[in-house]
Amino acid sequence: MSGHPAVDIVTAKSTVVIQDRPLVPLSSWLTDVMARCAGTGQVLQVLTPHDARITLPLRLALGGPRARWVVQEPGDGYYDGFSGLPLIWDGAMFTPAVQERPEPSATFLRRPPGDLGHHLVVDLRVRHKATTDLELGGAAEALARALAGTAPRCWGTAEPALVRWSQSELTALCRRRSPRATWLAYMGPHEAGSAHPPFGGTIRVSRVTSGVKETVAFTVSYGPGREPPLEELAALADRYARAGVLQVLTAQWAPGGPDLTYPARWQGAPVPVALAVGPEGVAETGAAHAAASDGGRAIGDPGAPGMWYVLGDGTDTGAWNRLGDLMERLGGPRR
């Protein structure tokens, strides 16, 4: 991969891409490097200056276990763009610095520029029957309409996403690529003065033995003073549970800037606000056991219900403990 135009350093363990620019998107070159790293088992490491920002699709891509956002300090040194913890180059890759009590970089802890609102971060996983009339992309569009008031504007396999939003065209691409998985990004209206909040995300479509799985990441940016739209989320979870396709939905409320770009700075901790489990998961756990868990209510078809759990209003970090306790109970006694 040393001859790839986007690659700057290649070792047996990693591929390093240096992006010396103020805003770093998930370009087609980067998606190509990611695919090659997946084939070779190398870790992708994207190195940016400390004052650079990354886009939402790139943030989602770098959040996996085989990728890292490396940030260069104003002087010497490096840190992780998500945690702020110091990194060192060990000759093969950037790795966490060995320290007795590692502290985040002072650069990372600086106040982010501008006023912060909140980002609602939703992870939705649905599984469809593999039928000839199946149309994909509906889950992402439903999230967008319910939480941002409009459908996505465009989609593509890299940034910038230049293809006008079309579920039929998206489905056709996934069919051509099947049985290989298809990953794509989508965005909402982003022109100045739009009546709708900025939103976007990614979709991963994969063929599994029991059907076709869609994993949808959705993020929408709200201004200060807004509360998490839990009723809208509950209605969506009920809709997909009733259709029998819901596997799981999780929602987090995170401090964030007014657009969908991310600086290498601390902006505050995300807090889980809701969890939905589909009929299949509830059946495996046992409906009575799932219903007995704190804060849960049945959704979907009463004969094959899913469950909806409210974890908090987005202000209490203790919601992480409630989520952990809930997951432990749901994974406990089986029917």
Image (cartoon, helix red, strand yellow):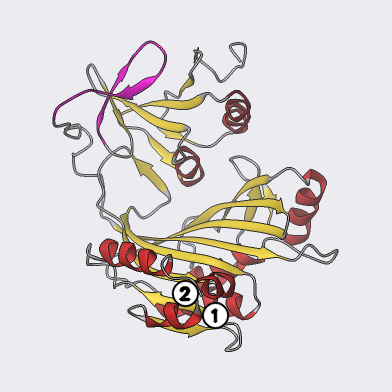
Examine the rendered structure and indicate whether residue 329 appears above or below residue 158: below
SS under mark 2 = helix
Examine the rendered structure and indicate whether residue 95 appears above or below residue 256: above
Q: Residues within 10 Å of mark 1 (few under 14, many from 20)?
A: many
User: Could you tell whether 210 is left or right of 254 in the image?
Assistant: right
Residue 139's image quarter? bottom right
Examine the rendered structure and indicate whether residue 138 appears above or below residue 205: below
Identify the amino acid type marked 2: Leu
- Of 141 and 67, nearer the camera is 67
Q: Quadrant of the N terminus?
A: top right
Identify the amino acid type marked 1: Asp
User: Could you tell whether 129 is left or right of 149 in the image?
Assistant: right
Residue 65's image quarter? top left
SS under mark 1 = helix
> Which residue bears the numbered disc 1?
238
Question: Residue sitting at 27 percent across and 56 percent down?
Answer: 116
Q: Which residues are magenta?
A: 84-100
Q: Residues within 10 Å of mark 2 (few under 14, many from 20)?
A: many
User: Could you tell whether 4 is left or right of 124 in the image?
Assistant: right
**Is residue 277 magenta-colored?**
no
Instruction: Point out residue 200 in the picture as x, y percentages from the top left corner.
Output: 52, 55
Instruction: Point out residue 145 in the picture as x, y percentages from the top left corner.
Output: 56, 71
Question: Number of marks in the image?
Answer: 2
> Which residue bears the numbered disc 2?
233
Residues at marks 2 and 1, CA–CA distance in whole angstroms: 9 Å
Instruction: Point out residue 251 in the picture as x, y percentages from the top left corner.
Output: 42, 64
Residue at the right extreme? Answer: 132
Residue at the bottom extreme? Answer: 302
- Of 263 and 94, nearer the camera is 94
